[in-house]
Amino acid sequence: MFLNHFEYFAPKTPAETMELVARLGSKAKILAGGTDLMVVMKAKAISPDYLIDINGVEEFKGIICEEGKGAVIGTNTKLAEIQFSEAIQAKYPALAYAAGEVGSSQVRHMASLGGNSCNASPAAETPTPLVAIGAKVVLSSISGERELPLEEFILGVRQLDLAEGEMLTKFILPEPAQRSACRYAYMGRRDAMEIDCVNMAVSIELTDDGETVKDVKLVMGSVYPRPLVSKEVPALLIGQKLSDQLIEKVAEATQGEAKPIDDIRASAEYRREIVKVLARRLLKEAYAAAQGV
Amino acid sequence: MEKNDLKSKWNLTPEGWNLEGVPAYQDEKRYTQVGRSVPRVDGPIKVKGEAIYTGDMTLPGMVYGKIKRSTYAHAIIKKIDFSKALELPGVLAVLTGDEAPNKWGIVPQSANETALAVGKVRFYGEGVAAVAALDEETAEAALELIEVEYEPLPVLLDPFESMKRSNEVLIHEDNKGNIMAAGDQVYGDVDKAFAECEYVLEREFHTNYPQHGFLEPHSALASYDTQSGQLHLWASSQVPHYLHRQMSIVLEIPMNKIRVTLPAIGGGFGGKGEAASSEFVACLLSRKVGRPVLVTFDRQEVFYTNKGRHPCHMKVKMGLDKDGFIQAVDFDNTLDKGAYSGWGVVVMFYTGSMIHLPYKVPNVRFRARNVFTNKPSTGAMRGLGGVQPRWALECMMDEMAEMMGISPYELKMKNAIESGHTCINNMFVPHSEFKKCLTTAVEKSGFLEKQGKLPFGKGIGMAGAYYISGTAYTLYQNYKPHTSVMIKVDTEGGVTLFCAASDIGQGCNTIMCQMVAEELGIYYEDVHIQSGDTEIGAFDLGSFASRVTYASGAAIKMACVEINQRLKETAAGMLGVRADQLIIKNHEIYSMYESKKRMPWSKAVETYTSINGTIIGMGNFSPPRRKGIDIITGNRVQGANIGHSPTFGFSCQVHEVEVDVETGRIYVRKVTEAGDCGTPVNPMSVDGQVEGSILFNIGACLYEDIKLDANGKLLNPNFHDYKTPTAMEMPEMDTNIVESYDHTAPFGVKETGEGAVQPTFPAITNAIYDAIGVRFYNLPITPEMVLKALKDKNK
Amino acid sequence: MKKLIELNINDRIYEVAVDARDLLIDVIRKKVGLTGTKKGCGDGDCGACTVLIDGKPELSCIKLAIASQGKKITTIEGLVQEGGKLHPIQQAYVDHGAVQCGFCTPGMILSSKALLDRNPQPTEYDIKHELSGNICRCTGYKRIIEAVEAAAKVWSKEGVQ
């Protein structure tokens, strides 16, 4: 129940943070919300020598969400802020909803958007809609910055495309296209403090006729070591108008792509069933929302 | 005192009692303190965060104890090397099992547990050693330095496997077949009865392995005084007396040198109804180091030590005659005991006695065996021994009602017992409003209009149940009263009640004050209570089997007789009337015939005490013992020991569920409950207990189960994977206390808090059947099971 | 070596010597001596350890003490009003029978306060959603929700802090 001894740093600026990250390398862990980190350290699964507390760096927090300009969200923006942000609720409702369903109210006030992605747990909630929205992450170091799509950043269970000396500092969300909508859903055993057995986000964009699918992205969480972007769904849907049969076909194809495991939360077989159900429900919901937009 | 100051700030007009035309002095039901929903005496300090729980306490020189736990479910302990731990600065002592080899057990005849493991470990997480250190961090670090060498043994995780392989693997040397206890009881002739039944049904039911999940982990602070040899133990426990006894047995200290005090307790539900290793280790270490030692479990340890509900594998056969009257029940039960005996015998026989109520059952055959496995021991969990058979029997009745083509409500009403019923096993029910419970719940929920008529995926189900109000016997051979109280009245201290009863959150401190106030004719706010201390308070058996209200009520009534008599005699002299004409109510003593002859209660107290000193009233309660013998034949009746109670509480629940047929998720939307708890001493408290009971068992029905891997290691010893219901899972609840008054009981009271757990499992299971046409015989009912069943159904 | 830090708890500054690894709950309970905050699980799963940090509910059992400097920490002991009067939420819990064993109560009350501070007119769903991080085993939550609803009414009448 006690953590190991470590040295604690509380930088005040991004530059100070980058310097520490570069210098301390893999012996250090970033402390943002700590809701994953503290639990894992208590279980003695990891024992970092250094903790870099970034909560004192204002530049890492904040939501910039202006009309027509997508959004930029600082890595240490708390999930509760995203949940209650009217701007995010309006432009990226799937993200606001997903953020609002993570853990508990207390967890949401502590946990950061960056942490939820960097922890790279397959059951993480916010990466799923972020990938569906087409979010990019900005990785910074003392030598500069690079951007990459979130789905290329999360490589597997607790594995990231993050070089030593780098740190995730921002999320860049593209402006949603006209006639598009993104929706998120999850399934667990109970409706709070849950580790999802499946979660999913669907983003649909329609052509000018308001019925034909121009682009679609379906992302599954908790059924693969990382957020799984469906290949079948775009192949089957782009250029089509949605019908019940098509939705059923697509849902089944999605089910085939998922690669869930058995664990104490749910069996692989059940997860596969839920993938199909969520796909069906989300496709309908996102399609209807895109039409209404 | 001004007359106005004496008025209780609570509304004094009776709530809900119809007292038209009944003269006050003749109506024993005209209560002013009992039957009021007063807020709990300890409410304010709890909301301010000022209530002191064991883990909040600090004593001078206090050090911390921690327990090293086995990482094998079954193994011989070959060697324990703690030399490195002792060398760690700040470590004061190390303790191993062989230093306290005396066996203890809540039921002494089957006691086979030790404070720490001796020779071998029998479940994953069993304590093998303990350390005392200056601070918790050092204690935890010291545990890492204790090296234990184990020789693993084969692990038995299922009672059937355990019985089958007992020649190869014996968990306890003294228990052949790995059987902790077995029993069978035969009443009448079930086979003959079945042969004559029109409707016969046989089914198998399997329940799960849940845990109480109380928020406060076990905690114990022991302070051994080296000079006087006195031991003072503060612990989070429901049973101060049993704790007192067990410490004496294990530490070999006479009971009169041990004092147990209960601080505030953060929930028990039966899980703190036995001694825990925290308590033994704290005492043993304190004696060893001569300083106070605090041992608080972390949440994982609470799961490891469990003492939760026995998984039951039940084979039930029920027979109805052509008119729908139950003629016979054949009940076979294999219980999973886990590693140690504890409550095993009691729970096993309770499952048998549960068959006999709340319906008339003329022929019964009961066979059961409680089997050891290498899992954390099972024990007493809310509604002990009742929840599992009640689930099976109520589901059976639902199925049989369908076979007959009548509603389950009709079937239950036909067979329901009434006041004055004697069961075939000689249990006597002095009072019952069970039928009223059934009717109330059914009418309020609209059950008859909805059953079978809701759209697919929505369903409604009902179940009835009962529970005891205290046991007939103590758990060890003894003839002393089960509860004693002492009430002190004087002008300095006012009125103080002394009773060692344990308030675990169920609110018994409050209701005892209400009962004292009622009986003495004063206000509940005037009564102070000293409870939960074996030295200060008079003896009480503990908070289990829903016994405290009834038992303390009876003892309180007796204690007040003496006090009232003296005050009445004093007042009589001062008023010039006869003492037996006087009534004491609302802080006044007055003649029932001449209303001008009245005086303040406090004046009588002052006058009496200035002549004679402090008034003390003593009261005792022992439940009647006649039930063990059949009065007509003089023969001993089987099953006489367990299940009998001075009186019984009843309830009925109707659950409305919604099943998401695509995901298998079950949502309990609304629960309508009607309960017979006799007089509700504190209606708000009763409602709180009932609401808590309902959600408690919704959790065990749908979400909760302790999971283990093939080696017996617990996979979910924490709250994120052991899923207790959150506020999101709460259904709409409509709880009703039916008007009821048990003339044989003090203030007419019966039990609440365990009766209301009983109908939950079957009501939900029956509602799911109504929703999707599938009956489940395994718990918990998971979404996966639902989906699979729907798939199989559609094939 | 321990570091001397200042913690602002209930509008009072406490100077405590801590290791970097010390958790806020242990510092509050043991070093500062305020035992109203309870440890139910130590893993962030039950909410009993909830405190308010700058008015937001957080889990003190997974929060470092050293990371809590410069913030306004509110524990249950900080809610009592002048003259020992109960805060409306506390009063509502007592009046509505929302307290049984009391162990979840401090955390539950602070979560309730955080909710009402942010949303003074919550719906039943809002209340359930925001309190779902606080586990209660005794009450079944019904009276807790009623208490919060009652407190919300007082909020709107009295404009409470």
Image (tube, coloured by chain):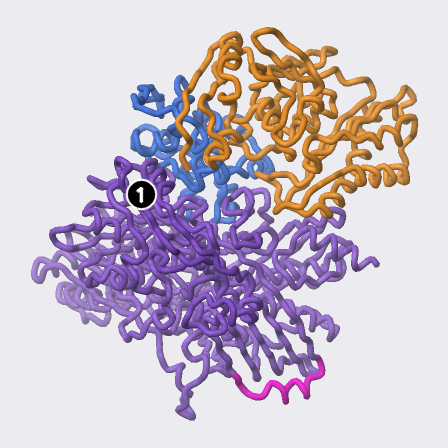
Residue drawn at (48%, 26%) of the image:
C56
Q: Colour of chain B?
A: purple
Residue C115 vertical position relative to residue B492 in the rendered view, above or below: above
How crowded is the residue under tag 1: few (<14 C-alpha within 10 Å), some, or many (20+)? some
Q: Colour of chain A?
A: orange
Q: Which residue is mark 1?
A: B52
Query: Image check: B386 left or right of C28?
Result: right
User: Percent x, y for residue C153?
Assistant: 50, 34
User: Percent x, y for residue A112?
Assistant: 56, 23
Q: Report the magenta residues as a range.
A: B186-199
Residue drawn at (49%, 58%) of the image:
B375
Q: Colour of chain C?
A: blue
Outermost residue to the left: B611
- Along the viewing direction, whichever of B121 and B386 lies nearer the viewer: B121
Residue B134 vertical position relative to residue B465 in the rendered view, above or below: above
Indicate the chain on which mark 1 is placed.
B
For residue B480, say whether it is visible.
Answer: yes
Query: Image check: A105 left or right of B520?
Result: right
Does the magenta-highlighted stretch encompass residue B197?
Answer: yes
Q: Quadrant of residue A186?
A: top right
For residue B466, say whether it is visible.
Answer: no
Does the magenta-highlighted stretch encompass residue B468?
Answer: no
User: Percent x, y for residue B468?
Assistant: 45, 69
Q: Callout 1: helix, strand or loop?
A: loop
User: Percent x, y for residue B389?
Assistant: 56, 69
